[in-house]
Every structure is written in structure tokens, then in C-alpha cells.
Amino acid sequence: MSKLIFNAADLLRVVDHSLAAPKQSERLDHYEQSPPYRAITKPVEAPSVLLVHDQGVYLMSNGWPRDIVKDQTSFVAYAQGCNPDHDRDWYDTARDLVGGDDFGECLPWAAEIKAQIDAGAQEIAIEIGGESIALVERS
């Protein structure tokens, strides 16, 4: 089981945006099994965050409209050691924590993360293992 650690101050902007957004982006449900293999999406009801692995590992708001910081880039909060702009070994660290494949997972935890931050958490932890992803309390 791997543990991703996020700075609570960075995540505050992510969850505040998701909670305040007028709607949430849809989530991928599956792809059609025959051509043209279109993506089938479903609505997301609860304010959510997206856990993403591509250029690093990070959380971003699922709120719409997006929280754009520059051009088409959304604000993100990187997991410790996984920021390509600041962490020399980000690529290996990301692979060690979440594997080699890129992914995006919609997690309906904006309110829960906000509650941890409001309760004084300085860091937010997410455990990943096998087929599970869990928001955990930091001890």
C-alpha cells in the first residue's frame, strides 16, 4: 500500500473551488465496445477532486468551470515528491507510489478533505493499494 501526502494549504484552493463550483465535470464510466469507441461519461453529484498521474501525481478540482491558472492549465496540488517543477526524482517517485500508467480518478471527497483541513490537518493522506483508494486520517 502506498501513501500519497499532500500539503493541506495547497489543497485548500482545490477543495474550495470544487465546493463552490456551480457544477462538477462528468466522470468517465467506460468506452463503447465497438467502433468508434466513444467515451461514455456520467454526471458527478458530490463536489469532487481528481487524482491524476501524468506529469507527476496531483489532485485538482473537478468543479466546472475549471480553476485555470495559465492558458489551459488548472491549479493542482502535487503529492510530496511528485512535482516535476520542484522534485528532481519526481518521475521515479510517482512510479513507485502509483505505478507507471497515467490515470485520472474522480473522488467525491472535497467536503471530507475540507473538514480535515478545517480541523487543523497540515497534511492530507491518500492510500493506494491494489484496487483501492482511500482518504485516511493523519496521525
Image (tube, helix red, strand yellow):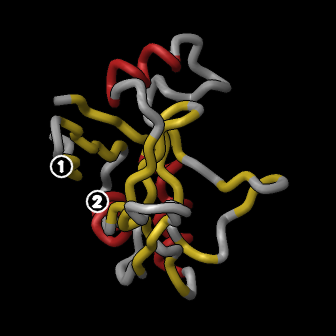
Q: Which residue is mark 1?
A: 137
Secondary structure under the numbered disc 2 in the rendered image: helix
Toward the right, the furthest residue is: 71
Image coordinates of residue 110 in percent, x first then y, are: 38, 67
As drawn, the residue found furthest toward the front would be 35
The image shows residue 41, relative to residue 78, as above or below, that is: below
- Looking at the rendered structure, the kind of residue marked 1 is Glu
Kindly tell me whether residue 75 is visible in this rendering. yes
Q: Is residue 84 left or right of residue 61?
A: right
Q: Residue at x 36, y 45 (%)?
A: 122
Q: Secondary structure at mark 1?
A: loop
| Foreground of the two, 123 or 56 | 56
**Residue drawn at (34%, 30%), measured in percent from left and top?**
98
Could you say which disc has been placed on residue 8 in the image? none
Res 118 seen here: no
Quarter assignment of residue 47: bottom left
Q: Quadrant of residue 80?
A: top left
Q: In the rendered view of the protein, which quadrant contains the C terminus?
A: top left
What percent of the width, then of the height, locates residue 127?
22, 40
Dot 1 alpha-carbon crowd within 10 angstroms: few under 14, some 14 to 19, many 20 or more? few
Residue 132 in percent (x, y) is at 17, 46
Residue 15 at what x, y percent from top left?
46, 65
Q: Residue at x 28, y 59 (%)?
A: 116
Side of 79 relative to 5 (left or right):
right
Q: Which residue matches tag 2?
A: 116
Quadrant (top left/top right/bottom left/bottom right) for the N terminus: top left
Label 2 or label 1, whichever comes before in sequence order: 2
Q: Are marks 2 and 1 in contact (CB under 8 Å)?
A: yes
Q: Amino acid at mark 2?
A: Gln
